[in-house]
Amino acid sequence: MTPGCARRSRALPDPDTIETARAWLREAAANAGRVVDVTDDAIEIAHARPWSTVLRAPTREGAILFMKMCAPSQAHEPALTVLLASSQPSLVPDVIAVHPRR
């Protein structure tokens, strides 16, 4: 770390936010015809950074789903990813859902 620079916090979102996100991930996956493993331990935090937290969830079909919760500074990212998926699908992950209010 550079002298004089503060280390940025990597605190996780609060437990209620994580549980709400896990529930939404299961619902969005089901709406897309995919079933997420039902145990909460199966949906893990893949990374937590000040700008986003990513959850990783295995499905019964063997696929892995990722859900990204963006901080306000990255609020543009879901819409941008959807736009890129429609114009250059080979360059971005498959988007199965975007939360309408987040």
Image (spheres, grey):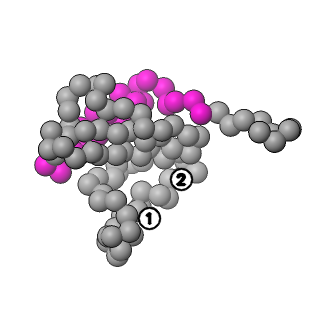
* Residue 68 as seen in the image, left or right of residue 31: right
Q: Earlier in the sequence, mark 1 or mark 2?
A: 2
Residue at image x 18%, y 43%? Answer: 62
Q: Residue furthest bottom?
A: 87
Mark 1 burial class by Cα count in 10 Å: few <14, some 14-19, many 20+: few
Residue 5 in the image: above or below residue 87: above
Q: Secondary structure at mark 2?
A: helix
Q: Position of residue 16 (x, y in %)?
A: 41, 25
Residue 13 in the image: above or below residue 85: above
* Residue range (magenta): 10-33
Mark number displayed over residue 74? 2
**Picture quadrant of residue 67:** top left
Label 1 sits on residue: 80
Q: Position of residue 76 (x, y in %)?
A: 49, 58
**Amino acid, disc 2:** Gln
Q: State which quarter of the image contains the N terminus.
A: top right
